[in-house]
Amino acid sequence: MTALELNAEIYRTLGEIAENEDLLRRALKSLKRLAAKKQDETLMTKEEFFERVDEAREQIRRGECYSFHNHESMNAWLDSL
């Protein structure tokens, strides 16, 4: 089953219990518990993103970076790691 099909099935099932507030609360609690398990550590706030951009700009200003003029030189550097 694809993600789209699963999503549709979830909504269809929620529609079946839509009149029962207790069942909806239990479903919400379960979904929140599942969502909490899937925390993407790569996500960041807008402020964190711009802090990282500012830090990168500062590192570039200090010369603490690598620059490549073509992909061969970049690949050579990557191969050396």
Image: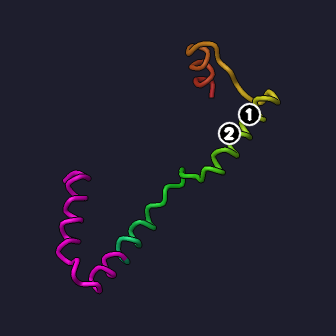
Q: Residue 77 in the image: x percent, y percent? A: 63, 22
Query: 27 left or right of 62?
Result: left
Q: CA distance from mark 1 to mark 2?
A: 6 Å
Residue 44 sits inside the magenta stretch: no
Residue 60 falls in image quadrant: top right
Front residue of 44 and 18: 18
Look at the image and tell me in which quarter the C terminus lies: top right
Residue located beneath label 2 in the image: 53
Write down the region rendered in magenta: 1-28
Look at the image and tell me in which quarter the N terminus lies: bottom left
Single out the residue that lies furthest toward the right.
62
Residue for point 18% across, 66% down: 12
Residue for point 60% across, 53% down: 45
Q: Are marks 1 and 2 in contact (CB under 8 Å)?
A: yes
Amino acid on which the number 2 mark rests in the picture: Val
Residue 52 falls in image quadrant: top right
Our reading of the magenta stretch's main secondary structure is helix
| Location of residue 43 with respect to 67 vertically, above or below | below
| Location of residue 24 with respect to 11 vertically, above or below | below
Residue 57 disc label: 1
Amino acid on which the number 1 mark rests in the picture: Arg
Q: Residue 26 in the image: x percent, y percent? A: 32, 81
Q: Residue 25 in the image: x percent, y percent? A: 33, 81
Asked which secondary structure carries label 2, the reply is helix
